[in-house]
Amino acid sequence: MVKIEQVVAREVLDSRGFPTVEVELLSGSLKASAIVPSGASTGEGEALELRDGDPKRFAGKGVLKAVQNVEREIAPAIVGKEFLRQSVFDDLLRNLDGTPNKSKLGANAILPVSMAFSRLQAMVNAKQGFSPLALSENLSSAFGSQGLTLPVPLMNVFNGGKHADNGIAIQEFMIIPTGFNKFSDALRAGVEVFHALKKILSKKGLTTAVGDEGGFAPRISAEEEAGPGSHEKVLTLLLDAIETAGYRAGEDVFLALDCASSEFSKKTASGISYQFEGAGRSSSEMVQIYEKWISQYPILSIEDGLAEHDWDGWKLLTQKLGKQVQLVGDDLFVTNPEFLKKGIEKGVANSILVKLNQIGTVTETLEAMKMAHQAGYTTVISHRSGESEDCFIADLAVATDAGQIKTGSASRSDRLAKYNQLLRLEQALGSRAKFKGKGSFQSK
Ligand code: PGA
Ligand code: ZN
């Protein structure tokens, strides 16, 4: 039983310098806190992020209303009460809000309370005082997973799309170090590739300033919108960096893309059109481009290859490439069990991106993951482009045997905080630490 005695909420700042919500829950001498992240290329179906809209503060991005909702709506409903399970606690939060997309209180008010409850419960349940494993063990029992597994990192070393201003349509170019026996070795390889890439870019006279998720974001072509062949140039740079760091591309280290293609798509009279490398392309033309890339580059995973409303295109994409490559739905599924159910029924995608703040409670996040695993879909736990020092997602990934985590490149402390937490968890698990490498990419 967890008895909540006090709730504290405040406005803090995320990694982009935008306001976000931090919540603390207190019980006796225990205090648990959590900070919510925030996206930039958000899916339309995401739970609502409540912003004040007051132009005098943070250009309208303040979150004082969400803070107030925690203090005035949520706190009176939970203080003094005892809760046995996360699901019971989260049900209360959902009922307090009462809307399908958390638009009354705001997902940024509800989620930090839900996450802080997980931590508080973990502290209460921790058998021998403090343990770095307390949260993952607690989440693991809420999820009902078999064991604690370290995820393969999908490291976003080259940023484009909405996370940069270099005219590259695709948002994330990731490296996946799979050919290693343990997480820390895989992470080291990824970090070494990142440093090799920096040297390669410097030698070519390209800027090595980083984008929102800590990856490099140089302008590789002079035009406003990077033209034909520009994306393949980036893929080639990544292969060079892998080899330069002393690893074998396609054996030790693979590639992944998050196209975030809703951002470069638009509805036209004849269907959905993608503005890509200087021309408008149909869904099937985009599928052909991906098909060609998969045959030429060691790409293991493509996220949001087509737009969130392009369900017919997604069906074609899955039919053509679903056996060869992981197809991850992010904007498409928005961590929502309802959208995922539709995807499973229609045979769309074979993997789901998992972002707590897209759905707004820990329990609903776990529900979506359970549904995915049961249907043989893989799961990729993910940060947002606006992050903080909170590393809940590292514990979540280990707890749920998710297999994969996207938490940025090897720079910016908001990204490295998660990797460092994973290193702590690996050490605490000792010989119990599992790491599946490429095995995390096969449908279960
Ligand atoms: P976002 O991007 O956090 O800006 O939505 C991350 C992603 O699309 O995976
Ligand atoms: Zn995405």
Image (cartoon, rainbow, N blue to C red):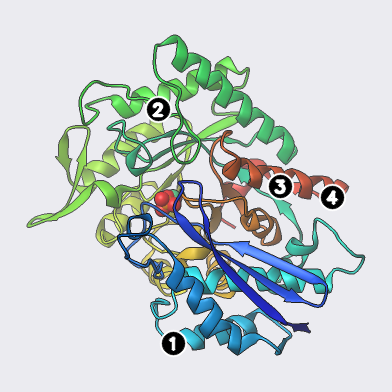
Name the kind of residue labelled 1 in the image.
Gly
How far across and how far down the image is residue 250, in percent?
Answer: 54, 29
As drawn, which residue projects farthest toward the top?
Answer: 203
How far across and how far down the image is residue 442, in percent?
Answer: 57, 50
Disc number lying in front (1 or 4): 1
Disc number lying in front (2 or 1): 1
Q: Nearer the viewer, residue 349 or 390?
A: 390
Name the kind of residue labelled 2 in the image.
Gln
Q: Secondary structure at mark 4?
A: helix
Disc number lying in front (2 or 4): 4
Disc number lying in front (3 or 2): 3
Name the kind of residue labelled 3 in the image.
Leu
Q: For the residues marked 2 and 4, what is the alpha-carbon distance in whole angstroms?
A: 40 Å
As drawn, which residue projects farthest toward the right?
Answer: 128
First in residue order: circle 4 vs circle 3: 3
Residue at 44% across, 21% down: 237
Residue at 45% across, 65% down: 358
Residue at 33% across, 43% down: 162
**Above or below 69: residue 31:** above
Q: Kindly identify which numbered label has been placed on residue 422.
A: 3
Q: Quadrant of residue 247?
A: top right
Q: Kindly identify which numbered label has been placed on residue 296.
A: 2
Q: For the residues marked 1 and 3, what is the alpha-carbon distance in whole angstroms?
A: 35 Å
Residue picked out by circle 1: 98
On the rendered structure, is 347 left or right of 74? left
Q: For the residues marked 4 and 3, what is the alpha-carbon distance in whole angstroms?
A: 10 Å
Q: Secondary structure at mark 1?
A: loop
